[in-house]
Amino acid sequence: MEETRYSGFSERPRKRCCRQGTQLVLLGLVTAALWAGLLTLLLLWHWDTLRSLKQLEETAAQNVSQVSKNFLRHQSDQTAEQSQAAQMLQSLEELRAAQKQMKSQDSELSWILDGLQADLNTLKSQNLNERRRTSDFLEGLEEEVAKLWMELRVSGGSVCNTCPGNWVNFQRKCYYFGEGAKQWIQARYACSDVGGRLVSIHSPEEQDFLTKHASKKGSWIGLRDLDVEGEFIWMDGSPVDYSNWLPGEPNNHGQGEDCVMMQGSGHWNDILCRSKLDAWVCDRLATCTPSTASASQAPPGPALRQRS
Ligand code: MMA
Ligand code: CA
């Protein structure tokens, strides 16, 4: 109807219609291109996301495996450490036990050692005592022999009154009056040095002689009760057959008086052996001078050996 209405002008609408079609096509094409672009972008984004996810997944898996590996390693380390600690604890216990045993062994050993030391000391002192007893016994024998020999000489007509220089004769003995501050034991050695021993006194006559000659300040004499308290022994080994104690003596004053001194008056007192006195008296047997008749027959007398 329209073609009829506008029959003289048919060229123009056809052109409008074509341009619109072209525009539509172009629009469609642009839209399609846009959609295609959008889709492409979406696809690309999707792929990228997928790739990232995959990567993340891989990384996560790697991390998980690393962590589990680490965990396992840590667990095994811990187990090793635990067993090591248990071992160390056991070693410590063993050490403690060993130390305890060593300590008990040590105390046992020191106990045995103490015992051995005590035994040794006992043996030593026994040996020393034995030797002293033997030597005292020998000295006593020698003394007896010398006295018997002297009797024999006297009965054969000999005169026994000869003393070395510095010694004073009385009856058949010689006496040395030493001076100088000494303890009893030092006086004993001093007498030994001059060939005698600390004096032994056996009669009132001998005592009178000594009282006259000895120092008025007091002297050491050869009497002591060192071994058994109250049991006094003379240096010549003879028993105490005569005594001249001060009244009330010996009293072992203060429980330590084991050596005897002769006072200026001649009386005796037991005092401390470590006290120092200014004088001491030694004795020894005199030597005999043979009579002219027996001189040729008599065997030589025993030499009086240096005394202890
Ligand atoms: C002193 C001392 C003793 C003695 C008494 C006597 C104090 O001690 O010499 O040996 O027995 O005197 O009184
Ligand atoms: Ca006394």
Image (cartoon, grey):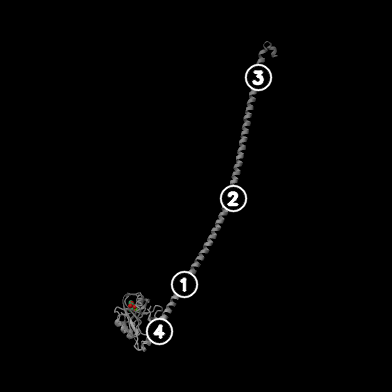
Find residue 83 and report its image quarter.
Answer: bottom right
Rendering coords of residue 292 (x, y %): 34, 88
Identity of the amino acid at label 2? Ser
Spatial CA span between label 2 and label 4: 100 Å
* Residue at 46% over, 74% down: 123
Relative placement, left or right, of 265 versus 42 is: left
Residue sitting at x 43%, y 77%: 131
The answer to which of 279 and 44 lies nearer the viewer is 279
* N-terminal-most mark, 3 or 1: 3
Question: Disc 3 to disc 1, how far (Cα)?
Answer: 140 Å
The dot on residue 22 is: 3
Amino acid bearing label 3: Thr
Residue at disc 4, CB closer than 8 Å to ligand 2? no
* Residue 76 - label: 2
User: Mark 4 or mark 3, which has the lower sequence index?
Assistant: 3
Q: State whether residue 89 is above or below residue 149.
A: above
Which quadrant is the C terminus positioned in? bottom left
The mark closer to the camera, 2 or 4, is: 4
Residue drawn at (64%, 27%) of the image? 36
Nearer-N-terminus badge (2/4): 2
Task: Tell me which numbered mark, 4 or 1, is placed earlier along the sequence.
Answer: 1
Q: Where is residue 279 in the image (x, y as percent from the top left)?
A: 31, 77
Cα–Cα span, label 2 and label 1: 64 Å
For disc 3, the neighbor class at 10 Å (few under 14, some 14 to 19, many from 20) is: few
Q: In this view, does 7 lie to the left or right of 307?
A: right
Q: Pinpoint residue 96: horizontal percent, then vertical percent.
A: 53, 61
* Front residue of this view, candidates 253 and 10: 253
Q: Quote the CA–CA distance across marks 4 and 3.
A: 176 Å
